[in-house]
Amino acid sequence: MDYIGIDRVRELITRTGQTAFLQGLVTEIERDFRRWHEFEKSARYACHSKVGVIELMPASDGEQFSFKYVNGHPGNTAKGLLTVTAFGVLADVATGYPVLLSELTLTTALRTAATSVLAARLCARPDSRRMALIGNGAQSEFQAVAFHGLLGIRELRLFDTDPHATDKLEANLAAMALSGLQVVRCGSAAEAARGADIVTTVTADKRNAVILGPESVAPGMHINAVGGDCPGKTELDARILLRADARVFVEYEPQSRIEGEIQQLPADFAVTELSDVLAGRTPGRSSASEVTVFDSVGFALEDFSALRYLHRLHQRYGDGRGVDLVPSLRDPKDLYSLLRAPAARLSAA
């Protein structure tokens, strides 16, 4: 079976080009959301502890099956570890054989940014050029690059409670030398949101937090709420969602009810799935003054799309490596031969 590690993902992005890679990923995710009805869907399985969560995220279209293993441990950074790590498998439904084992730590950040862009294309005002980026940790560069390169954002307004995180983001963006991008450092979330067309919140604390209050939301704003992705973890004041001029968009409603910003609201609170917008059953933004909220929690279909996209690039460029995760046997009923063969070689020696 094929194997894609961190080095291979970097190589595929370098060969494709960062913006082109992200655009290809947006296209792949959009294509799969457009055939939403073909997928077997379920909310992810989550094993929660006092310090974090470990999750499994499955999806299948009847021809291929995928799952992602992913953790979320906000305290890891104090130990010099990543908050989120992940890997995934893509398998052939007809045989049950895995065809790809891949890293998904880096790729999850990329697909999250790609999904954010897809939602913004549907929901944000087309003339949006200023974005607040609240939370400047591991996901922030990916959101910044995707919105600048694919949505035309020209001003980024940054805020994080940890000034070192903003230092890191500023340095990385400066090193990228992104043409036409102005970066503004702000002293608070409210300052960052002031005058912004889009507000992206991508914080990591596992708690019900108010990262963005109702006083910071202006008519016509699009809010890309990325950080809240498990029970008991939110970023938005519930009053934002309840505004008379607001509409809330989600990936997969049953999962978002458990993990998203809408966990704060009654079960009958109306939301719109992105697939309904893409299918033309309902509009995205309906007016220039409407407030739109993408309550993003990350859904397994996006990982399915990402794995298949990576696999296609891996095969296109060649020179990749495999891994012997599944045995290849002359007689498929003789599994024990895998143990017998080394013994025979030792005897011959």
Image (cartoon, rainbow, N blue to C red):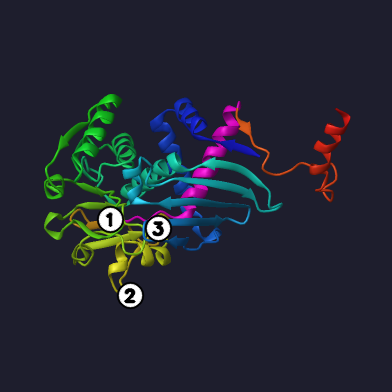
Percent coordinates x, y for residue 296 in the rendering: 35, 55
Percent coordinates x, y for residue 334 in the rendering: 84, 48
Q: Which residue is mark 2?
A: 268
Specify the segment rendered in magenta.
295-319
Label 1 sits on a secondary structure element that is loop
Earlier in the chain: of badge 2 and badge 3, it is: 3
Q: Which residue is mark 1?
A: 285
Q: CA distance from mark 1 to mark 3?
A: 16 Å
Label 3 sits on a secondary structure element that is loop
Earlier in the chain: of badge 1 and badge 2, it is: 2
Q: Is residue 100 magenta?
A: no
- Disc on res. 308: none
Q: Is residue 306 magenta?
A: yes
**Mark 3 neighbour density, 10 Å: few (under 14) some (14–19) many (20 or more):** many
User: Residue sitting at 53 percent across and 44 percent down?
Assistant: 307
- Which part of the image, by quadrant, shows the C terminus? top right
Percent coordinates x, y for residue 203 in the rendering: 28, 50
Using the rendered view, name the quadrant where residue 137 is placed.
top left
User: Residue sitting at 42 percent across and 32 percent down?
Assistant: 20
**In the figure, is residue 167 to the left or right of 329?**
left
Q: CA distance from mark 2 to mark 3?
A: 17 Å
**In the figure, is residue 148 to the left or right of 84?**
left
Percent coordinates x, y for residue 176 in the rendering: 30, 26
| Type of the residue with mark 1 | Arg
- Disc on res. 251: 3
